Amino acid sequence: MSLRMTRQHRGLRSYIWTWQHSAQLLVLLLAFWLVLWWGAPLLMHRWADVLGWAWPHLGLGSSDGVEVKTTSLLGMPIDVVRTHFYVPAPNLWQWWGGALLSLGLMALSFVLSRERLPLIYGLRIVALLGIVGLLSYEFLPTLAVSDVNRLLADNILDMGLAMLWLLPAVHALVLYIFPIPVLHKVAATLTGMLMLVISIPLQAASLAWLSQQFSLLVTLPLYMLFSFLPQIAAQLGIYGLFMSFAPAPEHGGA
């Protein structure tokens, strides 16, 4: 049967599940985890090399500001990338400019017609995050300064490592259960992992650079808007692409 895109509902009960499918799922899952067990430490060093090269070119500091450290997770040692860079505190004009911009966006959201409802919610979210950034710096300045490296770069890198380990399991639960050719399943997971391998250091460096170009006021809005959401959206897009090639069930029952 040739594969084609389909819009029909494809619940799992529309297909016959056998022990061969279970075996295939477990083999694929274990194979990807074995690759990660071997390759994750090497990947952390490659990420550190890339970021160490980028740090001075982006004006974030010397290459010594990026290093690989070993930490413990559930009693097991794992390598992680740690960074250091300086983000300036806002001056008075920046603080009041951020306050006026946040209030202006909030006011604009109340003026727009209800037909622009998605835009209204987007403006309010950005405005609220801006206000939270202003208040957190004003009332918790020590916390804002001490956690900026951890929040904008280290958390992104840790998230990428965690998503690499979780992605095969997620695909096993929501993709491998469908009668897609095994090469399509492998390609879907490899595409998602490759997306993470390439985009995570770029994302961490970009957020660090943007925060340094502005001030500590943008730390929280940048993290809330551009940390998890882009990666989740990209993975959903990859999943949807490969799921569109699943064949429709031959019988009409749902």
Image: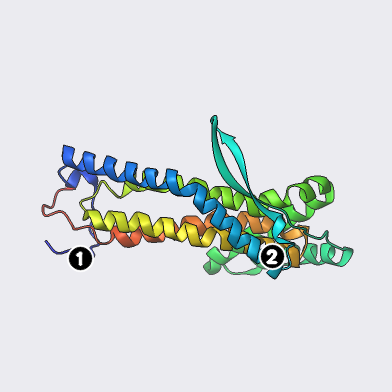
**What's under tag 1, amino acid-wise?**
Arg
- The residue nearer to you, when weighing 162 against 9, is 162
Viewer-side label of 2, 1: 2
On the image, the x and y values in percent for residue 141 come to 83, 49
Element under disc 1: loop
Visible residue check, residue 149: yes
- The residue nearer to you, when weighing 64 against 127, is 64
Decide which of tag 2 and tag 1 comes sooner along the chain.
1
**Residue drawn at 21 percent across, 55 percent down:** 181
Element under disc 2: helix
- The residue nearer to you, when weighing 47 against 19, is 47
Location of mark 2 (residue): 209
Q: Which mark is residue 4?
A: 1
Rounded to the nearest angstrom, the CA distance separating label 2 from label 1 is 43 Å
Badge 2 crowding class, 10 Å Cα cut-off, few under 14, some 14 to 19, many 20 or more, is: some
Badge 1 crowding class, 10 Å Cα cut-off, few under 14, some 14 to 19, many 20 or more, is: few
On the image, the x and y values in percent for residue 145 come to 79, 50
Please tell me whether residue 189 is drawn above or below residue 70 in the rendered image.
Answer: below
**Residue drawn at 22 percent across, 39 percent down:** 23
**Residue drawn at 69 percent across, 65 percent down:** 209
On the image, the x and y values in percent for residue 82 come to 65, 49
Q: Is residue 85 left or right of residue 14?
A: right
Q: Which mark is residue 222?
A: none
Q: Is residue 66 left or right of residue 37?
A: right
**What's under tag 2, amino acid-wise?**
Trp
On the image, the x and y values in percent for residue 81 come to 61, 50
Visible residue check, residue 121: no
Report how many numbered discs are placed on residues in the image.
2
Q: Is residue 151 left or right of residue 41?
A: right
